[in-house]
Image (cartoon, rainbow, N blue to C red):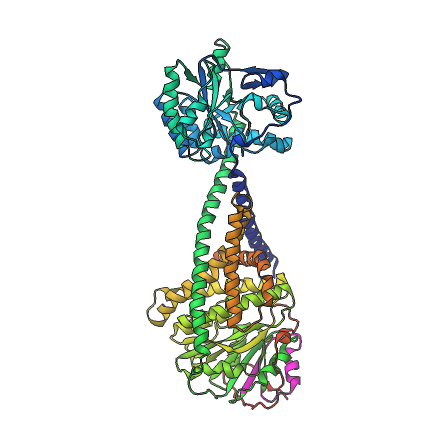
């Protein structure tokens, strides 16, 4: 691979990783910003060994700025209405409407994350003359956080307020605090620290207890000050259904006014207490503050949009998963029952001679076992094996010739790629039924015989065989074994019933020569020549079917790097084939039928579903940071259970042992993410129009290690002499 190609490949990989990191980061930001909290009233009171009596017995406004400790109360018959935990996009505007109706201004202590999510609501509060105070960014138990986190809570909340109002507030209400009498040593330390940061701590001496949900009458009684005392009354404009709070306000304000009370904000009440001396509790934000606030709110907003989009995608993934599961259960089961019925026949037994084409490029590790298994098949019509050595440099052709099998021929050609080798093999083959086999594949003795039986039906132009994973010892190979059974073989049953088979596997597939001539042979246009050819055969009006009894064992990549290279080629090649055959979407006849049925199936279940499947895992991680983590975990386990059920059905239909399924949960977190990144890289390659090279995978010759009861000998096989077709510049030699 040239340096520029390596850079492009690396850049596409980096792009996929960046996309995944951005998604995870957005989920974490949204989880942080959307963390639910308990109402303030749930806090208890601890020891008070360091709290001054002047504070516990003083007023609800505590000023520890400038190293001094002072407390203040509202003037007589003065009520400062305060609202905590907002803004709420529904309830805060309705609280505003009530206050506007009675021309009352209040102080709203806002949570920074909610301000970042609904800055317009806070902006309207400020324009209406209401006062804005800080109530932290995420409403945590501040005494349980390190000092740097507490400062971050204050500064981030302040930035959110700056973005909404253009001003910085000096008013602070600590989460989980009530009146001066509830100040313990831990809270006193927080109040002292807040004063050092320039904040004026505002508590409450009257709690409306609207969080209890006891009704409007109870709220009014709890909010009414004793005697003629002035009071800071705490209510809530968020955190739940605030209908009772609204009803109580509608009664409380006229009632208190009838008793001679006036309503004011905290700062106006302090101004009155100081005999008209103005108390400044906010200041204009600097340009730096405004820029930082914009960055913070943008991050929170983008995270919210990403989560909303992912939530929609989750519904799409769920719908696709359910649809695929239902379709597989109904159609794949129907396919298996029909094909295994005692009276099922394709027609009269097919005993015509068969030509097997084996394109081979540096296949020394497995070519001998592959050729022996092919030449020793028990097909009664005879098997001719044509090995096309595509410019191998490892002695592949010599190894085949040394076998001395009478029904095996070797053709040596300059390296021209797999499609060219297949076309040369077809041209050199002697018979009208052509089987195409990868050079690392080992056939069971009856594989060829079973594979060609569907040709008894004259409408069948090609047959897909049953590919099994031979080297199942590594975890990576076991993952692929599961994928082959569930994602390939089970899907082929579905496609067979719907008559829109998109791919005949390169490891084991059979074609009528007439069908290959109809489509002009194997094309070089894509990297997925098997998919390209199968689509072309379908569009030409031939039927493509799946024969589960024709079993071949292949060697799959045993490392993640090799797997990546293989799947990258497969994914990109499939996208190329879909694009090449896109006109079938508007065609009529068989081509149009395939285009309007087969292509959407591939797009939805072969590309969209694997590409979106990691959304489930991302939201699972996201849900672990939410109060509903048990629900999230339950939904993820339900999705896993659905996949496990599908796997069990697929393994039973394929008559496989269930033991490998123990790696299925791990597959969700590793293999699925790899598939996602491969698709991202393939999609990026497709968009840029880059040409991807064919990557030769390392083979160990272990395709047949998992095969049970499969003979690889060559005895008792009829030799079918071939004939040389003109116009092909090759050197052929019968193995001797």
| Quarter in which the C terminus is drawn | bottom right
**Outermost residue to the left:** 588
Q: Position of residue 151 (x, y in %)?
A: 60, 29
Q: Is residue 684 visible?
A: no
Classify 43 as above or below 104: below
Residue 361 counted in the magenta span: no
Q: Can residue 215 be seen in this view?
A: yes
**Outermost residue to the top:** 275
Q: Where is residue 240 in the image (x, y as percent from the top left)?
A: 44, 35
Residue sitting at x 50%, y 80%: 451
Q: Position of residue 541 (x, y in %)?
A: 38, 75
94 left or right, relative to 355: left
Classify 545 as above or below 557: below
Q: What stretch is highlighted in magenta?
A: 383-407
- Hey, which quadrant is residue 701 in on the image? bottom right
| Quarter in which the N terminus is drawn | bottom right
Give the camera-side residue of 406 and 48: 48
Classify 548 as above or below 325: below
Give the camera-side residue of 595 and 711: 711
Give the camera-side residue of 226 and 645: 226
Give the camera-side residue of 349 and 142: 142
Q: Position of residue 547 (x, y in %)?
A: 48, 77
């Amino acid at each position: 691979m040239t340096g520029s190609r390596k850079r492009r490949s690396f850049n596409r990989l980096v792009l996929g990783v960046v996309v995944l990191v951005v998604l995870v980061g957005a989920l974490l930001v949204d989880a942080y910003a959307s963390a639910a909290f308990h109402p303030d009233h749930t806090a208890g009171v601890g020891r008070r060994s360091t709290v001054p009596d002047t504070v516990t017995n003083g007023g609800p406004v505590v000023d520890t700025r400038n190293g001094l400790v002072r407390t203040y109360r509202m003037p007589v018959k003065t009520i400062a209405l305060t609202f905590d935990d907002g803004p709420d996009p529904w309830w805060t505007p309705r609280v505003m409407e009530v206050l506007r109706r009675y021309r009352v201004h209040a102080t709203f202590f806002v949570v920074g994350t909610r301000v970042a999510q609904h800055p317009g609501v806070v902006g309207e509060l400020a324009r209406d003359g209401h006062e804005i105070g800080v109530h932290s960014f995420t409403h945590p138990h501040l005494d349980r956080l390190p000092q740097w986190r507490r400062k971050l809570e204050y500064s981030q909340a302040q930035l959110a307020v700056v973005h909404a109002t253009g001003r910085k507030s000096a008013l602070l209400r600590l989460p989980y605090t009530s009146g001066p009498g509830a100040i313990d040593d831990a809270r006193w330390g927080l109040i002292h620290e807040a004063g050092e940061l320039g904040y004026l701590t505002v508590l409450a001496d009257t709690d409306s207890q609207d969080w209890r949900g006891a009704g409007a009458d109870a709220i009014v009684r709890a909010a009414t000050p004793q005697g003629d005392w002035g009071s800071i009354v705490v209510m809530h404009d968020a955190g739940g259904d605030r209908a009772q709070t609204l009803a109580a306000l509608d009664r409380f304000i006229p009632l208190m006014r009838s008793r001679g009370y006036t309503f004011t904000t905290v700062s106006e009440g302090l101004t009155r207490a100081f005999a008209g001396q103005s108390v400044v509790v906010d200041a204009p934000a600097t340009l730096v503050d405004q820029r930082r606030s914009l960055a913070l709110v943008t991050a929170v907003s983008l995270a919210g949009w990403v989560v909303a989009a992912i939530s929609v995608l989750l519904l799409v993934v769920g719908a696709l998963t359910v649809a695929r599961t239902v379709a597989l259960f109904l159609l794949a089961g129907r396919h298996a029952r029909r094909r295994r019925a005692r009276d099922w026949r394709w027609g009269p037994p097919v005993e015509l001679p068969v030509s097997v084409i084996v394109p081979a490029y540096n296949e020394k590790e497995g070519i001998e076992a592959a050729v022996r298994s092919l030449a020793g098949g028990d097909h009664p019509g005879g098997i001719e094996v044509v090995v096309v050595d595509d410019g191998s440099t490892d002695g592949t052709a010599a190894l085949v010739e040394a076998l001395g099998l009478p029904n095996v021929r070797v053709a040596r050609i300059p390296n021209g790629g797999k499609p060219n080798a297949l076309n040369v093999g077809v041209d050199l083959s002697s018979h009208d039924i052509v089987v195409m086999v990868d050079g690392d594949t080992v056939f069971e003795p009856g594989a060829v015989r079973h594979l060609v039986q569907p040709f008894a039906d004259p409408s069948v132009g090609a047959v897909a065989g049953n590919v099994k994973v031979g080297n199942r010892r590594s975890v990576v190979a076991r993952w692929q074994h599961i994928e082959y059974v569930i994602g390939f073989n089970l899907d082929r049953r579905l496609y067979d019933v719907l008559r829109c088979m998109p791919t005949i596997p390169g490891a084991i597939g059979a074609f009528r020569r007439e069908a290959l001539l109809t489509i002009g042979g194997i094309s070089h246009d894509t990297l997925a020549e098997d998919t390209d050819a199968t689509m072309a055969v379908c569009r030409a009006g031939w039927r493509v079917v799946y024969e589960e009894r024709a079993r071949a064992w292949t060697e799959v990549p045993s490392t993640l790097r090799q797997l990546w290279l293989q799947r990258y080629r497969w994914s990109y090649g499939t996208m190329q084939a879909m694009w090449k055959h896109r006109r079938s979407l508007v065609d009529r006849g068989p081509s149009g039928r395939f285009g309007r049925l087969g292509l959407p199936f591939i797009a939805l279940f072969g590309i969209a579903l694997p590409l979106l499947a990691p959304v489930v895992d991302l939201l699972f991680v996201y849900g672990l940071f939410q109060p509903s983590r048990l629900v999230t975990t339950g939904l993820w386990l339900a999705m896993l259970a659905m996949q496990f059920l599908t796997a069990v059905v697929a393994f039973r239909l394929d008559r496989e042992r269930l033991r490998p399924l123990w790696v299925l949960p791990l597959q969700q977190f590793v293999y699925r993410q790899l598939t996602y990144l491969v698709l991202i890289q393939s999609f990026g390659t497709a968009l840029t129009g880059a040409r991807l090279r064919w990557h030769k995978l390392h083979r160990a010759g272990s395709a047949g290690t998992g095969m049970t009861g499969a003979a690889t000998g060559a005895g008792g096989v009829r030799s079918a002499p071939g004939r040389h077709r003109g116009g092909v510049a090759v050197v052929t030699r019968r193995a001797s």
